[in-house]
Amino acid sequence: MVLMLAAGLAAFSLLSRGTSAAEPQASKGQAQSPLPPNAPAQKGTAAGQEGLAARGEYLVDNVAMCSECHTPRDVEGNLDKRHYLQGAPIWIMPVHNMPNWAMRAPAIAGLEGFTDVQAESVLERGIGPNGIEIHPPMHIYHMNHADAQAIIAYLRSLPSNYTNP
């Protein structure tokens, strides 16, 4: 649990700096990219869209760690990868009662039911599609626009099991 909290704080720290977590920091002697640091992939090309989605996959799986809450767990507590990002009951609880604590993480694979503008609002400002601040334990991210676009491209590339209740 402490490890997850540390990972969440590290992710928040990276994403709230105003820089892209997807861009590696240059070391002495390394070649610099000719592109600006947050240059978005060219959306009009298949290769550009693949590059954008690959960057989003990295952010989803290694920085924001979305599967920790948005993927259900099996009886042994392991992530059920057959239902990757298909929504799940929240398995962690606050130490003190929090009336706005979410009991379920929604399905985000495919981003069904979200417009790109709504998804950007969640990722860049922490405001849900209903105009209300998202509920804990979801982190309120302040991602830059390029990272939000990459995550949206990746999530849209995934199959969805969304059903309108």
Image (tube, helix red, strand yellow):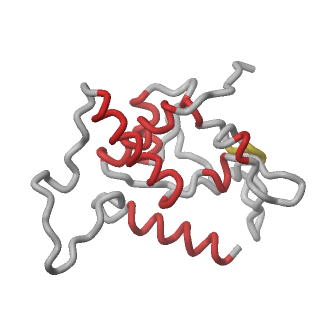
In the image, residue 156 above or below residue 15? above
Query: Which residue sits at x=82%, y=59%?
Result: 77
User: On the rendered structure, is 89 left or right of 159?
Assistant: right
Question: Which of 61/8 is in front?
Answer: 61
Question: Which of 20/139 is in front?
Answer: 20
Total marks shown come to 0
The spot of residue 162 in percent (x, y) is: 67, 25
Name the residue furthest bottom. Answer: 28
Query: Which residue sits at x=22%, y=34%?
Result: 42
The spot of residue 73 in percent (x, y) is: 79, 52
Q: Quadrant of the C terminus?
A: top right
User: On the rendered structure, is 54 left or right of 27?
Assistant: right
In the image, residue 32 above or below residue 61? below
Name the residue furthest top. Answer: 164
In the image, residue 108 above or below residue 126? above
Q: Quadrant of the N terminus?
A: bottom right
Query: Which residue sits at x=39%, y=54%?
Result: 142
User: On the rendered structure, is 103 left or right of 2?
Assistant: right
Name the residue furthest right. Answer: 75
Question: Which of 111/157 is in front?
Answer: 157
The spot of residue 161 in percent (x, y) is: 68, 27
The spot of residue 108 in percent (x, y) is: 59, 37
User: On the rendered structure, is 22 left or right of 59?
Assistant: left
Location of residue 118 (image quadrant): top left
